Image: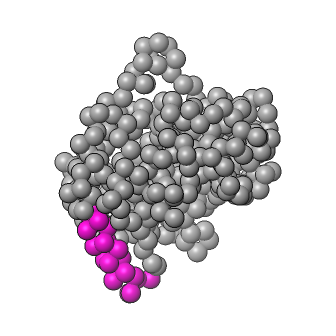
Amino acid sequence: MKKKDFWRITLDTNPDTCNLKCIMCEDHSPYSESKRERRNNGRLRPNMDRRLLEKVIREAAAMGITEVIPSTMGEPLLYPHFDVFLDLCHELGLSLNLTTNGTFPSPDKHKNVEYWATRIVPIGSDVKISWNGSSEKTQKRIMLGADLSQHIENARRFISVRDEWSNINYCSMTMQLTFMRSNLDEIPELLELAIELGFDRIKGHQLWAHFPELAKENLRNDIVFAERWNLVAKYCQERVVKHNETAKRPFRLDNFFPLQLEHLDDIAPNGDCPFLGEEIWVDPSGRFNVCCAPDQQRKTLGSFGNLAEGSLETLASSLQYQELMSSYQSHPLCKQCTMRRPS
């Protein structure tokens, strides 16, 4: 059984609100029926209530959790209480780990990047900007509604503010990818772009193909593409080693590990879960979740209570949670999870 040592919490504050339609997103993809069905049935998920937001963050801080992540489903900067989120982090001394789609929406469109940067960087541990192509064609094909030139400009402006604060609080910058056939050949170019722009890291994940239309994008369902991925990963690792010989700050790669060609159906045989015992997830209603798996599939892992009815610490110590920690490696959902890493 894994040891429980929670240090981070993710709050899915506004999962049904986003201004892009990335093809791999379980809810906002043009291939997804879930949000469309909820809208047609009048059951769109509400934003997290401000009082619940404050309750969860304060209880997390009291538990000794040191880092919080705003919604990774939907665009967090569109959450109407995001400034409250930031204020609570400032007050409680919590670090913010943000994943944004790179559009930086705000009421003042001209100064949107600088506004958010000056609010986030002083408490930021890491800011991940979703990015999936080095060419305009690929970026727009994967992240519908995105503009590559605007993405580049926004990143430059945000990183400029980060650099101004670097002696007070160094907020690392991550270019975040989903590895798939459409962008495989552009990953080396994305690495060069990330280095040139001043990012500290590229982090990626193998595609979790939620829809039949994405099966052809999966690098793990064809040994030819799996072998090509292994070559790309090896090239990127060697390029970073060379870069770091003279770099002022070392660049990092995350999840650029080779696929085991004899186990393509299991990305990391016997690999540990990166969430259980370490990170808590809370949905907009206050439901205690255990990971970032697609919501309907995640429910097959069990029911772990709601923050509207219990405290965060009590739910995190429940018998159901302890049992999952000891048995997850045999669960069908966990076996297909693309977030695990080789042990």
Please, which residue is most extreme toward the top here?
A: 41
- The figure's colour scheme reads one colour
Query: What x and y, as percent, mark residue 23?
Result: 32, 38
Residue in the foreground of this view, choosing between 84 and 129: 129
Majority secondary structure in the magenta region: helix
Q: Is residue 138 visible?
A: yes
Q: Is residue 118 visible?
A: no
| Residue at 28% in and 40% down | 215
Residue 193 spot, x, y in % from top left: 30, 66
Residue at the image position 80 percent from the left and 51 percent from the top: 62
Residue 241 percent location from the top left of the image: 37, 81
Indicate whether residue 304 is drawn in magenta: no
- Residue 230 part of the magenta segment: yes
- Drawn side of residue 187 relative to residue 101, left or right: left
Residue 205: x %, y % from top left = 40, 54
Residue at screen point 71% across, 31% down:
306
Count the labels in the image: 0
Residues in magenta, as a range: 229-248
Place residue 175 in its image quadrant. bottom left
Relative to 274, 243 lies left or right: left
Position above or below: 217 against 205: above
Q: Residue at x 66, y 48 (%)?
A: 325
Residue 242 located left or right of residue 79: left
278, above or below 190, in the image: above
Q: For the N terminus, give its image quadrant.
A: bottom right
Toward the viewer: 327 or 134?
327
- Please state which of residues 106 and 257 is positioned toward the viewer in this rendering: 257
